């Protein structure tokens, strides 16, 4: 059975049909990419799957359980993590604390124990600090383990989002344009990082405009255009698809 | 980041320990007690405003609940003052939960609006229920007994309030640097990011609002017992604004900023006393001035200048 099953998913914002009757499924342990021109509905799709939006119609199933319309905090509990196209880093906190927030659901969140500096909470936090620093090294942010988030450059913040998502110990990780705004070297590094993450067994779902990266990285690719599914398949299949070529290069190409 | 804060706590404890021996007379001791009481309320309010990013314009209302619980329950119903204090805190917490439950389902600064109304309603209630509260004239409050020991002298009160302050600062520092506190700061930094990592945003906002209301109510009770008399002024809208001003002047999201704000603005009316009737205007001017010149508040700005974390 597929890890994630999307069936006939649609959402409309007033008169705008952002996504129409999209169906696909994602197997466990693969890298799955969603591509398409600007405004095709890629980020909308992510927002639907991760519970930020509620679909107008259709079904989303994670491990067979219907999850559409469930709030993000519940989906987090089911092992879903994501990053954002427009950075969502807490600039009022340190880099390390941002990563630690990712572990939220694995911690004792009791208010009274926290205020009393309960030994179990203190010990767990000390361990978590090491764990978060380790994750920052994993994503290549060794230099920033003691930095404030608001003092870090854009490229580093993109990776910090990935580290925070990994701190959730997710089963499925949604990356919304992880290479957007990065220079070619940084893009290569993100490429390598995604491979590293996928190698740990996390299913990765990617929205990305960098075609070189998408084609080399993805096990399967979904192509969206004007909110509809245009094609789906392996990189080779998608590349050959007449509809895709028409949408990307113009019908006469 | 952690060390300077705990150093701050040690300095605070040392200053509080020495203070009563160097203060020239009882006027200053009284001022110090009122500063410490305000500081504790402002600490709770700053957790709400500075750390969680939610504004309350009705905290004086919660002070009023505590103060009147400690006045009315023992006087009219023979309830033990400690029980009355607890009942007031519970009532303030329950009211805060009931008011904020629907509000935190919405996005935006509706809490400010709701608490504004709530504070004013509470003030009117205390003013009008003259049979119970003595109306605008207020009523006397019996003294507070702690395990057969009656608090009466200003010295005793000073030590109680100073101890409470140190414990409150310690607890606030702990809270901020805990899973709960990080979730709170994270939802201030990015609501969507904290939702996605699993934070139940509405619950956290509510928890901190209820906690700050309970803080305020307890300090309202303490104030009432200390002064020995309570009038509706304790719950006036202006007092709520004073408390918010203390948070802003001292520094939002700064524990020690809360103390500095409370100390400065508690002293200010003494200085402004000559402007009789214009204090409100002066407070407004100070608030505006700070928003323009030092929007982050005194302590965070100074800390940044010194190259340290706030």
Image (cartoon, coloured by chain):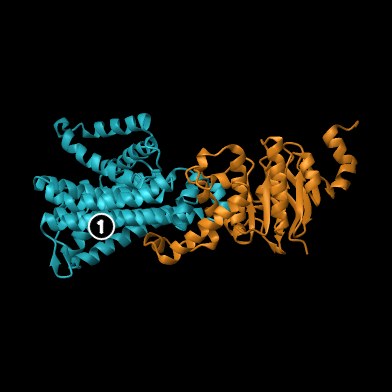
Chain colours: A orange, B cyan
Q: Is residue A154 above or below residue A133?
A: above
Q: Position of residue A79 (x, y in %)?
A: 64, 60
The answer, for residue A84, to whether it is visible in the render is: yes
Name the residue at 75% across, 59% down. A29
Q: Nearer the viewer, residue A251 or A19?
A: A251
Residue A58 appears in the picture as rendered: no
Q: Residue furthest left?
A: B25
Element assignment for label 1:
helix
Number of numbered discs = 1
**Is A141 displayed left or right of A210 in the figure?**
left
Find residue B51 and report its horizontal and vertical position in percent. 42, 47
Which of the image's four quarters has the N terminus of chain A?
bottom right
Which residue lies under the disc numbered 1?
A: B164
What is the x, y in percent for residue A236? 88, 46
Residue appearing at x 15%, y 53% in the figure: B227
Pinpoint residue B188: horizontal percent, then vertical percent: 47, 46
Front residue (pair A227, A32): A32
């Amino acid at each position: 059975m597929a890890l994630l099953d999307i069936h006939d998913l649609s959402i409309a914002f007033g008169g705008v049909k952002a996504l129409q009757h999209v169906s696909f499924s994602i197997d466990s342990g693969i890298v799955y990419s969603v591509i398409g021109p600007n405004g095709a509905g890629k980020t909308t799709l992510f927002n639907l799957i991760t519970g930020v939006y509620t679909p107008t119609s259709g079904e989303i199933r994670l491990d067979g359980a219907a999850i559409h319309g469930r709030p993000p905090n519940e989906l987090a509990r089911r092992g879903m993590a994501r990053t954002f196209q427009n950075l969502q880093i807490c600039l009022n906190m340190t880099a390390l604390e941002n990563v630690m927030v990712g572990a939220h659901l694995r911690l004792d969140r009791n208010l009274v124990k926290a205020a009393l500096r309960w030994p179990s909470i203190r010990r767990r936090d000390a361990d978590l600090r090491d764990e978060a620093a380790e994750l920052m090294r994993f994503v290549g942010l060794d230099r920033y383990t003691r930095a404030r988030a608001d003092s870090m450059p854009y490229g580093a913040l993109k990776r910090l989002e990935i580290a925070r998502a990994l701190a959730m110990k997710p089963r499925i990780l949604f990356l919304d344009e992880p290479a957007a705004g990065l220079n070619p070297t940084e893009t290569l590094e993100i490429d390598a990082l995604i491979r590293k993450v996928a190698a740990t067994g996390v299913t990765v779902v990617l929205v990305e405009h960098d075609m070189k990266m998408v084609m080399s990285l993805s096990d399967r690719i979904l192509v969206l255009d004007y909110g509809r599914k245009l094609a789906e398949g392996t990189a080779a299949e998608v590349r050959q698809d007449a509809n895709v070529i028409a949408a990307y290069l113009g019908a006469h190409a | 980041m952690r060390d300077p804060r705990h150093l701050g706590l040690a300095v605070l404890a040392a200053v509080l320990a020495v203070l009563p021996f160097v203060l020239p007379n009882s006027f200053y001791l009284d001022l110090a007690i009122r500063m410490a009481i305000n500081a504790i309320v402002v600490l709770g309010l700053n957790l709400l405003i500075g750390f969680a990013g939610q504004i309350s314009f009705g905290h004086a209302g919660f002070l009023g609940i505590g103060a009147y619980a400690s006045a009315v329950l023992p006087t009219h119903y023979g309830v033990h003052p400690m029980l009355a204090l607890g009942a007031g805190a519970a009532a303030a917490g329950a009211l805060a939960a009931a008011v904020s439950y629907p509000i935190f389902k919405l996005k935006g600064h509706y809490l400010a609006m709701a608490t504004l109304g709530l504070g004013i309603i509470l003030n009117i209630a205390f003013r009008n229920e003259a049979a119970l509260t003595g109306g605008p004239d207020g009523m006397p409050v019996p003294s507070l007994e702690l395990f057969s020991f009656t608090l009466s002298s200003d010295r005793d009160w000073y030590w109680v309030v100073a101890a409470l302050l140190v414990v409150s600062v310690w607890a606030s520092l702990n809270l901020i640097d805990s899973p709960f506190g990080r979730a709170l700061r994270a939802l201030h930094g990015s609501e969507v990011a904290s939702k996605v990592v699993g934070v139940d945003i509405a619950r956290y906002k509510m928890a901190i609002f209820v906690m700050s209301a309970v803080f305020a109510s307890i300090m309202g009770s303490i104030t009432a017992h200390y002064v020995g008399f309570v009038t509706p002024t304790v719950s006036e809208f202006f007092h709520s604004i004073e408390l918010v001003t203390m948070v802003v002047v001292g520094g939002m999201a700064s524990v020690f900023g809360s103390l500095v704000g409370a100390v400065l603005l508690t002293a200010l009316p003494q200085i402004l006393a000559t402007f009789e009737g214009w204090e409100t205007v002066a407070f407004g001017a100070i608030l505006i001035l700070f928003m323009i010149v030092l929007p982050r508040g005194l302590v965070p700005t100074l800390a940044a200048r010194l190259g340290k974390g706030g």
